[in-house]
Amino acid sequence: MRQIVLDTETTGLSTAQGHRIIEIGCLELVNRRLTGREFHRFLNPDRDIDEGAERVHGISRADLETEPRFPEIVDDFLTFIKDAQLIIHNASFDVGFLENELRLMKHKQAKIVDHATVLDTLTLAREMHPGQRNSLDALCKRYEVDATKRDVHGALIDSELLANVYLAMTGGQTAMLLDEDSADGYIDPDVAGQHADDTTQSELESIPDLPIIQATAEENAAHEAMLERIRKSGACVWDID
C-alpha cells in the first residue's frame, strides 16, 4: 500500500481572499514504512503573505521571489501522488488550496480525487478522541512524538511529524524515520540483534513465573472496536484472514 503524507503552507487562510500555496511537503510510505522518497517545493505566490501566516511558517515573500510557480511543478507533483492515499491533517484546507491552484491554471483534472484518495487524520483523531484537542501539536504530545526540533511550521517537517502521529494512531508504530542504522528502510539484523545474548542464564532463571490473565468479553469488544477504527484508515496489521 502506497501512502503520501502531505502538508502545505500558504499566504493566508482563505482561497476566497486570493491566498496561494507557498510550500508543499510530501513523504512516501509503502506498507507503513517511510521509504525516504519525498516531494518538497517552495512556490512563488505572486502576492504578499499575511503577517499572521508569516509568523506561523517564517516564510517571507522575498524568500520566494526566485522559486517556481505552481504550474511549473504541477506535473512532478501529480506524478508523485498518483494513485496513492494522501494522509493530511485537516484535509479540507490543504485539498482546497491544491484544487484552487489547479483551477487557476485551468488544469483538465482539477479535483485531487482524480489523482489520489484522501484520509483526513483530523477526522480520524476526532473519532478516536472525542471531546479532546486534536491539533497536530496536541496529537504529538498524546502519542509522544518529538516535535522539539520544529521552531516554526513547515510543510516537510509537519509531514514528518504527521507520519509518526498517523503510524502511532493506527498501529502503535512511531519510530519509523530512517536513521544511521538503516538504508532504504532496511535495518541491519546484526544491529537489531546485537543485545540479544546479553541476558545470562542465571538472569533468565531468576525471572518469576507470571500469571496469565485472559481478556474479558468487554475488553475483547473494546479491542475489536479499535481495530475497526484502524481498518477505516485502510490498513490493520493485526488482520490475518
Image (cartoon, rainbow, N blue to C red):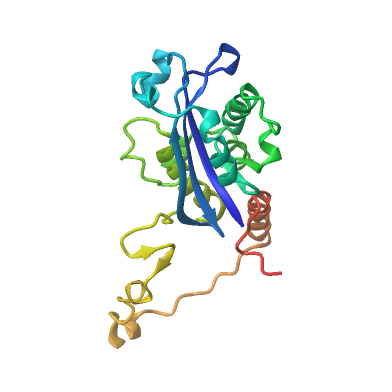
**Res. 133 visible in picture:** no
At 67% from the left edge and 53% from the top edge, which residue is drawn? 231
Q: Quadrant of residue 18?
A: top right
The residue nearer to you, when weighing 62 against 205, is 62
Rendered location of residue 240, percent (x, y): 67, 69
User: Relative to residue 88, is residue 190 depicted above or below?
Assistant: below
Rendered location of residue 33, percent (x, y): 50, 58
Quadrant location of the N terminus? bottom right
At 40% from the left edge and 33% from the top edge, which residue is drawn? 154
At 34% from the left edge and 36% from the top edge, which residue is drawn? 150
The residue nearer to you, when weighing 107 against 83, is 107
The residue nearer to you, when weighing 36 against 46, is 46
The number of numbered badges drawn on the structure is 0
Left or right, 56 with reference to 1: left
Rendered location of residue 201, percent (x, y): 30, 87
Q: Quadrant of residue 193?
A: bottom left
Left or right, 100 with reference to 145: right
Left or right, 178 with reference to 117: left
At 46% from the left edge and 19% from the top edge, which residue is drawn? 11
The residue nearer to you, when weighing 57 against 202, is 57
Quadrant location of the C terminus? bottom right
User: Relative to residue 119, is residue 189 depicted above or below?
Assistant: below
**Res. 130 visible in picture:** yes
Rendered location of residue 39, percent (x, y): 47, 43
